[in-house]
Image: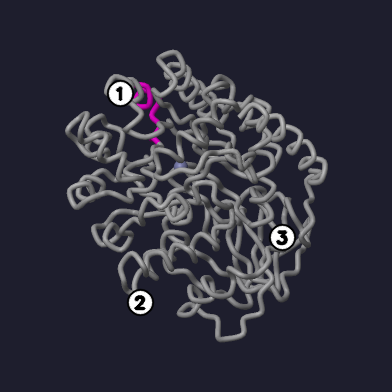
Amino acid sequence: MRLLIQDGTIVTFGSPCRVLEGQALLLEGDRIARIAPAAEIEGPFDRVLSARGKLVLPGLVNAHMHFYSTLVRGLGKAAPSANFQEILENLWWRLDRKLSLDDVEMSARVILVEAIRKGTTTLVDHHASPGAVRGSLGRIALAVKESGLRSCLCYEVSDRDGQAVTTEGLEENADFARSAAAARDPQLRALFGLHAAFTLSDETLDRASRMGGDLGVGFHVHVAEAAADVAANRSRFGLSPVARLAAHGLLGPGSIAAHAVHADAADAEILARSGAWVVHNPQSNLNNSVGIADVVGLVRRGIPVGLGTDAMTVAMLEELRVGLWAQHLRQDNPSCGFMELTGALVVRNPEIATGLWGFPIGTLQEGAAADVILVDYHAPTPLNDETVLGHLVFGISQAAVDTTICGGRILMEGKALTTGIDEAALAAESRRLAAALWERF
Ligand SMILES: [Zn+2]
């Protein structure tokens, strides 16, 4: 398949994030083969897409996601919660225990269609369904395959449901990591998932560390999301969650530490030395009222900070905007954080995806994955290398995604899905499962 995209304005992402006018993009198979003036690219082509009046961007990356929370939308039965622990106990831990494998797969199928619509082509998921652990990642993988998008999966192991469920979670991670390594499917990758240090014993952390180490995969874990995580770890183990996870060998290159809202200076030092990615999730942190990570401070120490949504949305540019406003408030300074937050989405998230997949993802460059979106946008002010990040936050974020391509496959064109997914039928089936789930809640 040779697909030429011409007549558009290319925004490369990466560092530097460049604006290319008068250039076309040739996709060959699942990679970007060439970026050059259209006249210099020789045919024949299987398809030529005109991007006139549109920007050509790389598919966006969401570095921390929970597909399983999709069916909670509109559920009003949870008791009011005064803090993060109560939110977990009144909502998420009640809900995830009731999820069936069918619910798990449907949750992923529905939200992945939304991801196609928002131009998010790579999602790093963190899954929990303690009542249906075994086989859950395989069911999510089916949904990912159907969607045409890319996802890195893991099961978030926790001790909160007893020893047997802990063991199931460890084995689910290991089995999926083994099958992903054997298949080398460009749509799927694996990490070893852990919920958070405050729901995990030292013994479980050691088991996970050994298993993940033997498999050669990194870890994906919530870290210092709320003050309660820090307090619980300090009182029970005498260490901060960052220090404790690091002591068990769970923070290193290729691993994701989600949140780090309550990482202190000593924690930041450990994180900086570890090589792990920190993933910031500002909308979730605001919604749960847990605080906002000191992204400016973390980046200043050299920590690579990416951007996730923690399932609040799949719209990465919305998350970026909120992250920027929240950082202004966090630093009490309306002129800070711009490069740190835009860099999280434009530079770090592509680095995270590239690190997990083992080939370039998330930037428009020759040799990179053919993950491309077209966005309706007529720049009303000069658009160039110097201004593009401002356009991204204040203008492109408000524009509609028209076309989504992942791995060289067109998944949406002219705002219509092209993969045969019937959205109305999918939503009807999802409502049926959600109603039954809410009955059990
Ligand atoms: Zn999360």
Q: Mark 3 belongs to which amino acid? A: Thr
Q: CA distance from mark 3 to mark 1?
A: 46 Å
Q: Earlier in the sequence, mark 3 or mark 1?
A: 1
What residue sits 59% from the left and 43% below the top? 150
User: Disc 3 designates what residue?
Assistant: 403
What residue sits 26% from the left and 49% below the top? 263
- Which disc is residue 335 wearing? 2
Q: Main secondary structure of the magenta part?
A: helix
Q: Earlier in the sequence, mark 2 or mark 1?
A: 1
User: Disc 1 designates what residue?
Assistant: 201
Q: CA distance from mark 2 to mark 3?
A: 34 Å
SS label for mark 2: loop
Q: Mark 2 belongs to which amino acid? A: Ser
- Look at the numbered discs 3 and 1 and tell me whether their residues touch, using CB distance below 8 Å: no
Residue 311 shows in the view: yes
Q: Which residues are magenta?
A: 210-219
